[in-house]
Image (cartoon, rainbow, N blue to C red):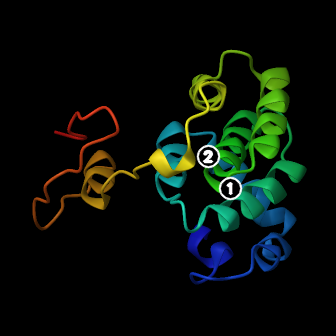
Amino acid sequence: MLDDLLGPDGTDPHLVAQAVTGDHAATLAVWCAMLPVRDLAWSRMSRPDAPRHLALWTEVSRRVVPPYEPAVLCLTAFAGWLSGDGASAWCALDRCARADRSYSMAGLVAEVLLNCVSPDEYLPLPRDVIMSACGRPTPTTTPHRSDVTGRTRGG
C-alpha cells in the first residue's frame, strides 16, 4: 500500500496527499503502531523521496486517532527533517509529545533537529539489512556503507 500511495519517483507530493483516503490512513496508522512495520516505513525514506513521504505522513497524521498517533507523527517528523522542513518536523514532534512523552523515535528525531544535523548526512540502511531484519534472507551479501561516525552499519 505504501508504494501505491507514494506513486512512482517524481510524483507530485500534492497528488500523494490527495490519494490518501480515510481507510488508507487508518490502515497505515494501525500497522505502523507495530514497531517493525514503523521501522520498515521509516527505512524506506530517502532524501530524494522525502517530500512525497512528508505529504503522505502529514495527511495520515491529520486523520490519526489515539492511541495510534506517536508512530505516524514521528514518521511525519522524520520526513519533515529529511525534506529540510524543520517547522513541520517540530510540529509533529510537539503533537507526539502530547500523545506519548516517552516515545523513543521522537527523542531521536528531536536530537537530530536540536543538533542541527543536515539531512544531507542521512544514509539510508542498505536494502539487504532491512530485509534481514524483517526475517527475509537476501540472495547475496553486500558490503555495508559506513554511517557518519565511521562505524559500519549492520555488520
Q: Residue at x 68, y 82 (%)?
A: 11
Q: Amino acid at mark 1?
A: Leu
Query: Quadrant of residue 109 in the image?
Result: top right
Is 11 above or below relative to 89?
Answer: below
Q: Amino acid at mark 2?
A: Cys
Residue 19: x and y in percent read: 80, 76
Q: Residue at x 86, y 41 (%)?
A: 65
Residue 74: x and y in percent read: 68, 38
Q: Residue at x 13, y 55 (%)?
A: 143
Q: Which corner quadrant holds the C terminus?
A: top left
Q: Residues within 10 Å of mark 1 (few under 14, many from 20)?
A: many
Query: Which SS class for mark 1?
Result: helix
Q: Which corner quadrant holds the N terminus?
A: bottom right
Q: Nearer the viewer, residue 112 or 142?
A: 112
Q: Quick one: which residue is furthest to the top in this view?
A: 102
Q: In the displayed structure, does residue 18 sit left or right of residue 70? A: right
Q: CA distance from mark 2 to mark 1?
A: 6 Å
Are dots 2 and 1 in contact, CB under 8 Å? yes
Residue 70: x and y in percent read: 72, 33
Is 74 above or below relative to 106?
Answer: below
Q: Which residue is mark 2?
A: 32
Residue 34: x and y in percent read: 56, 40
Name the mark on residue 28: 1
Query: Which SS class for mark 2?
Result: helix
